[in-house]
Image (cartoon, rainbow, N blue to C red):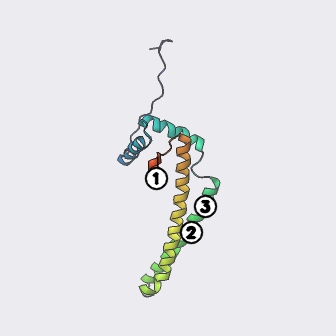
Amino acid sequence: MTRSAAAPKRKPRLRTELSEADEQRLQAAVVLFGLPKAEVVRRLIRASIQAGPALSAENTRAVVELAQQVRMVGRNLSQVLRAIHRGQAVRIEDTEPVWRGLHEVIAAINDELTEITVAYGSKLRRRAGLALPAEVLGEDIA
């Protein structure tokens, strides 16, 4: 069957299945931005191309450095566990400075990764024209 010249060409369509969590996120975006689902998806697709890679070269270097720190923390924990298994463990009170130090390193890594991902999310929303409403940003509208 051939298509007549007068028949309009169908626009490409996307049909996808979402997890419940992703559907909830999409619904939240619809409410937050006051746009239909399809428009939110279209804007995010366009913005993802305009915004470029998820991580800048600088952020990529930061993630590599953070991964090295995570490996260092893992090695420290591994050494502590091996000492415990060999029966060479010291009293828990004596290990408190080690655990505090590990906690501080993990918290710093978490903060830096959060900063990197939040910055990219803001960039993507700006490019998509999906500005957050003032009340969400904690700004006074009056």
For the residues labelled 1 and 3, the Cα–Cα distance comes to 30 Å
**Quarter containing the N terminus:** top left
For the residues labelled 2 and 3, the Cα–Cα distance comes to 11 Å
Work out whether 64 lies above or below 24. Answer: below
The numbered dot on residue 138 is 1
- For residue 124, what is the image quadrant? top right
Name of the residue lying farthest toward the front: 142
The mark lying in front, picked from 2 and 1, is: 1
Is residue 78 visible in the rendered structure shown here? no
Q: Which residue is mark 2?
A: 69
Q: Disc 2 or 3, which lies upstream in sequence?
A: 3
Name of the residue lying farthest toward the left: 20
Is residue 12 visible in the rendered structure shown here? yes
Residue at 55% from the left image edge and 62% from the top image edge: 112
**Are there few (<14), some (14-19), or many (20+) residues within 10 Å of tag 1?**
few
Element under disc 2: helix
Q: Are marks 2 and 3 in contact (CB under 8 Å)?
A: no
Name of the residue lying farthest toward the right: 57
Residue at 35% from the left image edge and 46% from the top image edge: 20
Q: Looking at this view, is 10 or 33 the one in front?
A: 33
Type of the residue with mark 1: Gly
- For residue 71, what is the image quadrant? bottom right
Type of the residue with mark 3: Ala
Instruction: Answer with left or right where residue 83 lies relative to residue 54.
Output: left
- For residue 72, what is the image quadrant? bottom right
Residue at 59% from the left image edge and 44% from the top image edge: 51
Q: Are marks 2 and 1 in contact (CB under 8 Å)?
A: no
Q: Which residue is mark 3?
A: 62
Type of the residue with mark 2: Gln
